[in-house]
Amino acid sequence: MIKNKLTRKEFLNIAKLSVLFLLTSCKGLSKKISIGLYKNFLPVSFINLLPKIWKKNNLNYREDNLNVNFRDKDIILINDGWINRVELNYFCDISDPLLNYLDDRSKNYLRTWDPIERKKLYPFGVIPYGVIIKNNERYKITNKNNWDFLLSKDLIGKMILPNSPRILISIAERINNKNAIKEIINQRNIYDDINAIDWLINTDAVLAILPLTICEKYLKIDSRLSIVFPNQGVPLMWNFLLIRNNFKQTLLLNLIDKLLERNSSNKLIKDGLYLPFNNEYIQSNYNYSSKSARLLNRPSEECWRNSWSFSSLKEFEKVELEKIWKNY
């Protein structure tokens, strides 16, 4: 005969097992991987390719103490402009298997950083800046132009520029005029990275200098807009992964393999985010002829070759940069 009643002892044992199962489940949920990133500069296609079970937190770069944001995150994706505000000792060294994925461009870029810094930084995406222009039929700016067009009298007071002295000074250094930065500053331009597209569409502004990931979606919906990447080169925005000690780096190997799939990488490049990995198909996207690049709204091979990146600022360099900016 089958026993259909539980003894008190059996009931208590089952209750203990249920509580243990519940605690184990909660523990598993509490260990859900958390990634911090700044979504404004990243395409939706990239966010969607991250594992669905990861908790995705938008970072607030405007906070005085960024590092408070980082302590409860397993990994951080942050661009080169904010690295100086991060305490890298919170993060672990990058493993060799991950480093082996990187292409020569990424490895060469890492060598420009101090040894202690480069051990913690993992390039995970590079975004070229572009010149997005409204009604370019009138101004006739092309990829063949160098950056001298920024001094055109037709553009005075009609440009939205990056709110970054470092980027603007680096561009001015490539203009054939020793007073270029002074002339740009005296043009009464707007300096606004966040609302640049709104200024461009809704005012008499003519052009804005912005990361391609921001421009791309507007190029698709507003026929007045076009984009130019001067063959003289453009500034590059690098995105780095920073990894906490308790995070299994092998999980990133799986993610990179997923990003390198043809469909995935096509989506990212179409949206302006280039992968920095040593993969034949990925590398082919850096090698467009000028004509193909123009038709696809992409930087040409010549532009990539002449483009430049920013490494960490030493304190004396920061002081010098601020001094140059204040002098104007």
Image (spheres, rainbow, N blue to C red):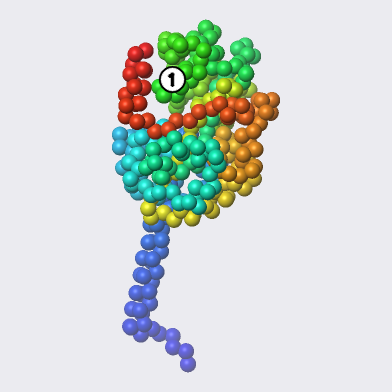
From the viewer's perspective, is 88 left or right of 276? left
Q: Position of residue 90 (x, y in %)?
A: 33, 47
Res. 31 in view = yes
Q: Is residue 97 left or right of residue 166?
A: right
The answer to which of 271 and 240 lies nearer the viewer is 240
The answer to whether residue 160 is visible is no
For residue 137, above or below residue 285: above
Tell me the residue at 54%/30% (across/down). 128
**Residue farthest to the top, as pictured:** 153
Amino acid type at circle 1 is Ile
Q: How many marks?
A: 1
Q: Residue at x 44, y 17 (%)?
A: 190
Q: Quadrant of residue 139?
A: top right
**Residue under pointer 1:** 169
Q: What residue appears at the point 58 percent right and 29 percent down from the top-left corner?
A: 305
The front one of 53 and 237 is 237
Left or right: 317, with 94 as reference point? left
Q: Position of residue 88 (x, y in %)?
A: 35, 43
Quadrant position of the C terminus in the picture: top left
User: Where on the picture, by quarter, is residue 62?
Assistant: top left
Question: Which residue appears at 37% of the width and 42% of the height?
Answer: 116
Outermost bottom residue:
1
Q: Position of residue 289 (x, y in %)?
A: 67, 28
Classify mark 1: residues with Cα within 10 Å, few (<14), some (14-19) or many (20+): some
Task: Where is residue 144? Give x, y as percent.
Answer: 62, 18
Q: Secondary structure at mark 1?
A: helix
Q: Is residue 174 above or below residue 65?
A: above
